[in-house]
Amino acid sequence: MSLLILDLDGLLRKPTIVSQYVPLPQDQLMVEGADRALYAYRDDWLIVGITNQNSVAAGYKSIQQCIQDQQSILKQIPQLQEIYVCPDFEGRKCLRVTRQHFYNHSQTRWFRQYRKPQPGMLKLAMVRHNHWPENCLYVGDRPEDKQAAYRADVPFQWTWEWIARHRFEAALR
């Protein structure tokens, strides 16, 4: 089994309203084609999400609201096992959110390295699930996603390439 690490914003969810920060779960939709791409990974991959949460760092949402939002996403997208969240601008904090609980992983060797483009969330996910970089894939839509993958030695794929590849493969079936 391999590890698929997905950036959430711009890949699995997009806002339905104009907002500087990621809106509430009810104000978001899954990016078209992402469901098809996720389906392709259902059998042989463990799937986790990672996200910087500027809305918490800027005081727009509380940590508790952020946790509830991530749990809502996990319920909407059952293929996701858990979500790693960096809620501060300095990269000091990292929460791992599951459907029922959350865990504070801030005091690890990646302290101050959680916020993308730093690799802390990717490395924590790999260690937690006992994976090496070569059996992982990180999919994202921003330059800081690509930088985080590079710094973690994890193969990277752009969101639009990942979705297009699975759209093409589905058309061939």
Image (cartoon, rainbow, N blue to C red):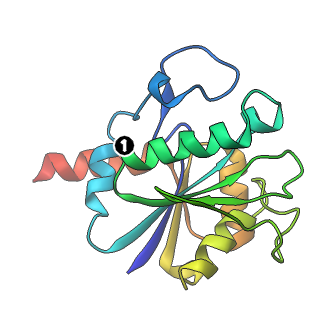
Kind of residue at badge 1: Gln
Q: Position of residue 153 (x, y in %)?
A: 67, 74
In percent of the image, x 86 and y 45: which residue is there? 89
Quarter of the image where one finds residue 117: bottom right
**Front residue of this view, candidates 173 and 140:** 140
| Left or right: where 120 falls relative to 139 | right
Quarter of the image where one finds residue 61: top right
Residue 73 versus residue 94 in the image, above or below: above
Q: Secondary structure at mark 1?
A: helix
Q: Position of residue 44 (x, y in %)?
A: 31, 74
| Left or right: where 171 falls relative to 5 | left
In percent of the image, x 42 and y 77: which residue is there? 2
In percent of the image, x 41 and y 51: which residue is there? 162
- Count of number-bearing discs: 1
Q: Position of residue 134 (x, y in %)?
A: 54, 81
| Left or right: where 159 falls relative to 95 | left
In percent of the image, x 37 and y 71: which residue is there? 45
Residue that badge 1 annotates: 76
**Residue sitting at the far left:** 173
Residue 157 versus residue 154 in the image, above or below: above
**Front residue of this view, candidates 103 and 76:** 103
Determine crowd level at label 1: few under 14, some 14-19, many 20+ residues with C-alpha closer than 10 A. few
Quarter of the image where one finds residue 30: top left
**Front residue of this view, candidates 36 and 97:** 97
User: The N terminus lies in which quarter of the figure?
Assistant: bottom left
Q: Position of residue 84 (x, y in %)?
A: 62, 58
